[in-house]
Amino acid sequence: MGQSFHISQNIAGALAYSDKDFIETFDGVFSDDNGRPLPATEAKELLKQELAEGHKLIRSVGCDNFDPFEHGCLGHNHPEGGS
C-alpha cells in the first residue's frame, strides 16, 4: 500500500510577506467555499482569521485528513501501484 500527502501553507509564513509580495504571490490562489478565487486582500483577511483561531496551516483542495494546528496532511493510503 502506498501513501501520499497534500502540501499545506504555513499561515504565519504567508502573512510575513510584504504587501507587494503577498499580492504577487497569493492573488487568486485561495478560494472561498464556492470555489471563487479570492483577491489577495480577501485572502489575507482569511489567513488572519485562521491564525486567530489557532490554526498554523491551511489545507490544499481535496485533503480530507488534515490537522490545521501542527501537522498538516496526515496522509492518504492508496493500493499498491496507485496514486
Image (spheres, helix red, strand yellow):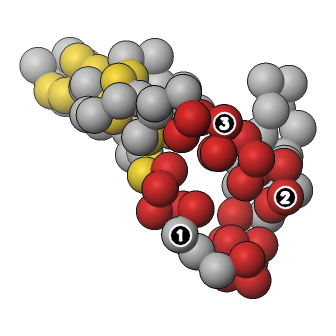
Locate residue 32: give its quadrant: top right
Disc 3 is placed on an element classified as: helix
Count the numbered circles shown. 3
Mark 3 vs 2: CB contact within 8 A = no
Q: CA distance from mark 1 to mark 2?
A: 14 Å
Q: Is residue 17 or residue 3 the one in the foreground?
A: 17
Residue 12: where, in percent of width, then height?
47, 56
Residue, disc 2: 41
User: Which numbered dot is residue 79?
Assistant: none
46 shown above or below 67: below
User: Which numbered dot is residue 49?
Assistant: 3
Q: For the point 46% across and 62% down, which residue is it? A: 13
- Please, what is the three-letter code of the amino acid marked with disc 3? Gln
Residue 29: where, in percent of width, then height?
71, 55
Locate residue 14: give its quadrant: bottom right
Residue 38 visible? The answer is: yes
What crowding class fits label 2: few (fewer than 14 Cα within 10 Å), some (14-19), or many (20 or more)?
A: few
The disc, 1 or 2, on the residue closer to the chain's N-terminal end is 1
Q: CA distance from mark 3 to mark 2?
A: 13 Å
What crowding class fits label 1: few (fewer than 14 Cα within 10 Å), some (14-19), or many (20 or more)?
A: few
Residue 38: where, in percent of width, then height?
84, 48
- Please, what is the three-letter code of the amino acid marked with disc 2? Thr
79 shown above or below 26: above
User: Which numbered dot is residue 16?
Assistant: 1
Residue 68: where, in percent of width, then height?
41, 29
Q: For the point 64% across and 45% down, which residue is it? A: 47
Q: CA distance from mark 3 to mark 1?
A: 15 Å
Disc 2 is placed on an element classified as: helix
Q: For the point 54% across and 27% down, which residue is it? A: 53
- Please, what is the three-letter code of the amino acid marked with disc 1? Ala
